Image: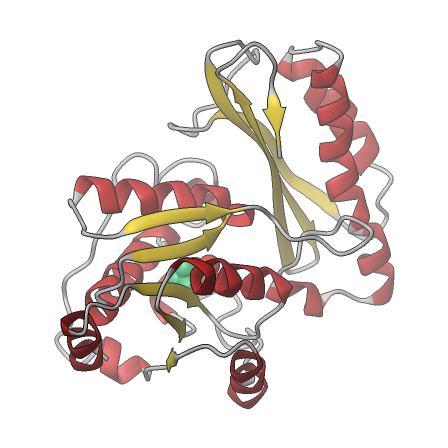
Amino acid sequence: MQSIAKNLKREGKSLGLVPTMGFLHEGHISLVRGSKAANDVTIVSIFVNPAQFAPNEDFNRYPRDLERDKKILENENVDYIFAPEAADIYPPGFSTYITVEELSNVIEGEIRPIHFKGVTTIVNILFNATLADNAYFGQKDAQQATILAKMAADQCAPIKVHIEPIVRETDGLALSSRNIYLSSEERSEAVLISQSLKIAKEFIEIGKYDCAVIIKAMQKHLSGAKTGLPDYIKIVNAKTFHSIDKIEQGGEYFILVAFKFGKTRLIDNLYIDYREEIPVMQ
Ligand code: PAF
C-alpha cells in the first residue's frame, strides 16, 4: 500500500483515506463521496481491528462481508481498497501503541478502557501505510473523531482529519454496522434515541440550557423503550469530553447518548456550536 501511495504522490496526486471496519452502509458511502469530491485518489481501508475490542466485546460476531463491500466500492469508483490481514498489521513482536491521553479515558473510554488505544494505533498505521493527505470520519463516533483529530495535530501528522455529519435512516436512527444485530422490536424502539436528541435540540432552540433539565427530558423519552436501557446520556464540552452543567455561549458541546439493547450498544449524538450568538446544531 505504501509503495503504491508513494508512486501516486510522485505523480502529484492527492490521496483521501476512508478508514472502515467494513460491512459498509450509506454513512461510509457519504465519507467515500466526500473523499472523491476533494481528492484525486480515494483509498478505503477495511479492517476489523482486534486491538480495539475487549475480550467481552463483539469482535467475533462483528459483521463481515468483503465481497459485498467490494461491489459497493466498485460502484462508487473507489480507486483502492486496502484490506490487510491482522497478521500483517500486528505481526509477532508488535509492541508500539499510540494513546491520546485523557480524552481516551473519559465517557466511552471509561466503559471501554482499551478501545481508543486500539483505534489510535490502527489509524496511525493506516495514515502511515496510505500516506493520505485527507482522512474522513463520521460524527456518529464523536469521541473517536475528536481523538483522531487530536492525535493528528499532536503528532504533526501531514494529514487533515475531516469529520462528516451523521447519516440517518428515514426514521432518524443513526446508521451503524451494528444496527444489523437489532431484533424487529428493538429496531422499532431504537428510533427513541434520535428522538431524544431532537427533544434536546428543541429545548436549546427555546433557550433552555440547563443540562439536568435537558437530560431529564431525554431520560423520560428513552424510558418508553421496553427492550433496552440507556447506558448514559451526557452533555460534554466538545474539546475535553468533560460533562458540563450548562450550555453557555462561547463553547462547543456534544449531547451524547449510548443505549443498550441486550449486548448491542448503539451511540448517537448532537453537536452544538454556540460560539456565535445563536447555537447551531447538527
Ligand atoms: O470507526 C471505525 O469503523 C473504526 O473505529 C476505525 C476508525 C475504522 C478504526 O478501526
Question: What residue appears at the point 81 percent right and 28 percent down from the top-left corner?
Answer: 220
Toward which corner of the image does residue 55 lie, by quadrant? bottom left
Which quadrant is home to the C terminus? top right
Which quadrant is home to the N terminus? bottom left
The outermost residue toward the front is 12
The outermost residue toward the bottom is 67
Nearer the observer, 127 or 229: 127
Q: How is the image coloured?
A: secondary structure
* Horizontal and vertical percent position of residue 114: 35, 54
Q: Is 255 displayed left or right of 154 in the figure?
A: right
* Horizontal and vertical percent position of residue 184: 85, 65
* Horizontal and vertical percent position of residue 205: 72, 17
Q: Is 78 displayed left or right of 156 in the figure?
A: right
In the figure, 250 relative to 194: above or below? above
User: Can residue 249 be seen from the camera position used here?
Assistant: yes
Nearer the observer, 133 or 221: 133
In the figure, 163 relative to 86: above or below? above
* Horizontal and vertical percent position of residue 156: 15, 44
